[in-house]
Image (cartoon, rainbow, N blue to C red):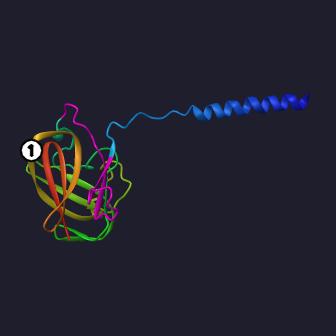
Amino acid sequence: MKQKVILFLALVLSVAISDSLYAQKFSDLDKSPMDVASYPSSYRVSEKAIKITYSRPQLKGRTVESLAKPGTVWRTGANEAAELTLYTDMKLGGTTVKAGTYSFFTIPGENEWTAIINRDLNVWGAYSYNEANDVARITVPAGTDRESLEAFSITFSESDKGVDMHLGWGTTRITVPFTK
């Protein structure tokens, strides 16, 4: 009789445990989903030169300037700071940046933006940004386009001297040149 009671209790306990395994709560989709852009952009090309992982905030009726404040270091996206991987040594401005993984920040401006490669990794936002850990900086002109992008977007293209990173949000357009 004791064995039947123990067997019954074990059965009830295993059902209770297995039921809770299947009742896990999954979170909703992120409001600013993570994305990756790389060059070459074809998924079939495994040897990349450069890749950036970033989150894509949406305007939702707001302005770029209210979300990426002019004159203030910005994480270049949402959530964690954007993470830039160079698979080969490249130059940003006149500074050679060794192959590796870095954080990527920007400082928005009305007519120009500053692009920053920084040694710190796993940085949430730009709250703990430390200028002393900058590896390279370049200031580039800010342009506009007639087409407005709801979601912050990054893409790459080949240039005569290397690879250009294009940032777009709203009608704002920025090109950051990486050279070899």
**Residue 71 at what x, y percent from top left?**
16, 49
Q: Who is closer to the viewer here, 84 or 50?
A: 50
Q: Is residue 50 magenta?
A: yes
What residue lies at 25% left-to-right and 54% top-to-bottom? 105
Give the residue drawn at x 80%, y 28%.
8
| Span highlighted in magenta in the image | 35-62
- Quadrant in which the N terminus appears: top right
Residue 54 lies, in percent from the top left, at: 31, 49
Locate residue 53, reporting x and y percent. Answer: 32, 52
Say which amino acid is labelled 1. Answer: Asp
Q: Position of residue 74 (x, y in %)?
A: 24, 49
- In front of the other: 85 or 136: 85
> On the image, which quarter does residue 66 sit in?
top left
Quarter of the image where the C terminus is located: bottom left
Which residue is nearer to you in this view: 180 or 59?
A: 180
Instruction: Name the side, left or right, on which 30 lies relative to 150.
Output: right
Q: Which residue is mark 1?
A: 145
